[in-house]
Structures are given as structure tokens and as C-alpha cells.
Image (spheres, rainbow, N blue to C red):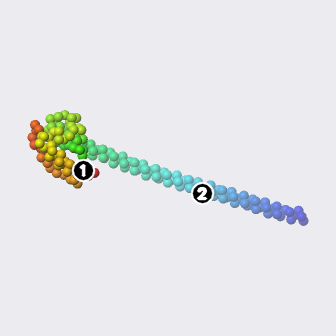
Amino acid sequence: MSDSSNNKPRASQAFMRKTSEQLAQRKQRMEYERKIADRDKLLEELHVHQIELELQNEELRQAHFRLEYTYQQYLDLYNEAPVGYISLNDEGLIIRANQKLAAMFGVELYQLKGRALVDFMAFGDQNNFNTRFKNFIRCQPGKAKRRLVVPGSREAILETRRAVG
């Protein structure tokens, strides 16, 4: 009797041990399957995000191309205009001009960049221009027309436009 009573606890312990091992294996398998599912979901999300980024990148490339095209059109209009165009910085120095303006001033285009616009004005107009230009720089963006006399040239109308920013 002592053998059969000893066998019951051993059999019960073996059963419990086997059941515990099966439960642990099942738990490990479920944890592994959950991790695989999480990984697959993350990979799918990353793939979708990659596609979204590729689409955004293509949109940016197209916008950049359109911007470059528009800028080139602007430069062509500016440079090939039948009237003189000039762009000045806030100190009145020439940062860009077109060929027509260079011809009006009787100089080569490369000789204009970095020079003060007043260098090309009649001496009597320089102070007047400097005063008005300083006021113009302080004012709100907009446009105004001014008379400009270039020595050795005919009178011209200077139309100023102050850009925002």
C-alpha cells in the first residue's frame, strides 16, 4: 500500500509537471506568434510609410521642376525686356540688371553689379534720390514712379516696387 500511495503523488506530480510544461510551451508559442504578428504589422506600416514618402518626394521633385521653370521664365523676361530693369539691395547697390539698362547707362552688364545706382545719375539728382530711396526702403511694400536723369542719356521714369520681406 505504501507503494501505491507513493505512486499517486508521483503520478500527480508528473501530470502537473507535464501540464505546466505544456502550458509554458503554449504561452511561449503564443508570445512568439504575437511577436511575429507585431513584427509583420510594423513591417507593413513601414512599407506604407515608405510609399507615402516616395509619393511626397515625387511631388516635391515636380514642384521643384515647376519652380525652376518659372524662375527661368522670369529671368528670360527680366533679361530680354525691351526696357531697363534693375534690382537694388537696401543700400541702393545694384544686385541685378538687364542688358537694356546697361546699354542705357553706356556700360557693360558686368560693370553694374555692386555699384551704387546714384553713380549713374546726374550729380544734382543724387541727393534727391538718396533721400527718396531711404524713405522708400522704410515704407510698406508697393510701387512708385520717379523721374531719373542719366548723364549723357535721356530722361527715364524709374518705377520702383518693393517686395514683401
Task: Residue 32: give x, y in percent of width and height.
Answer: 62, 55
Task: Residue 143: give x, y in percent of width and height.
Answer: 19, 52
Q: Mark 1 or mark 2: which is in front?
A: 1
Binning the other alpha carbons within 10 Å of mark 2 as few (below 14), some (14 to 19) or many (20 upward) gives: few
Q: Secondary structure at mark 1?
A: loop
Viewport quadrant of the N terminus: bottom right
Q: Is residue 157 left or right of residue 5?
A: left
- Residue at (14%, 38%) from the top-left corner? 104
Most distant residue in the right direction: 1
Instruction: Please name whichever residue, 134 or 105, is drawn nearer the observer in this view of the structure.
Output: 134
Asked where in the image residue 89 lies, by quadrant, the reply is: top left
Asked where in the image residue 112 lies, by quadrant, the reply is: top left
As drawn, the label of residue 55 is: none
Instruction: Please name whichever residue, 150 or 56, is drawn nearer the observer in this view of the structure.
Output: 150
Residue that carries the numbered disc 1 in the rendered image? 163
Residue that carries the numbered disc 2 in the rendered image? 34
Task: Residue 33: give x, y in percent of width and height.
Answer: 61, 56
Task: Residue 156: give x, y in percent of width and height.
Answer: 12, 44
Q: Secondary structure at mark 2?
A: helix
Q: Is residue 87 visible?
A: no
Binning the other alpha carbons within 10 Å of mark 1 as few (below 14), some (14 to 19) or many (20 upward) gives: few
- Residue at (13%, 43%) from the top-left corner? 125
Q: Is residue 25 left or right of residue 121?
A: right
- Residue at (83%, 64%) from the top-left corner? 8
Instruction: Please name whichever residue, 161 or 54, is drawn nearer the observer in this view of the structure.
Output: 161
Residue flagged by tag 1: what amino acid is it?
Ala
**In terms of sequence position, does the residue under pointer 1 or pointer 2 come before the other?**
2
Residue contact at pointers 1 and 2, CB within 8 angstroms: no
Give the distance between the C-alpha atoms of the residues marked 1 and 2, in whole angstroms. 60 Å
Residue flagged by tag 2: what amino acid is it?
Arg
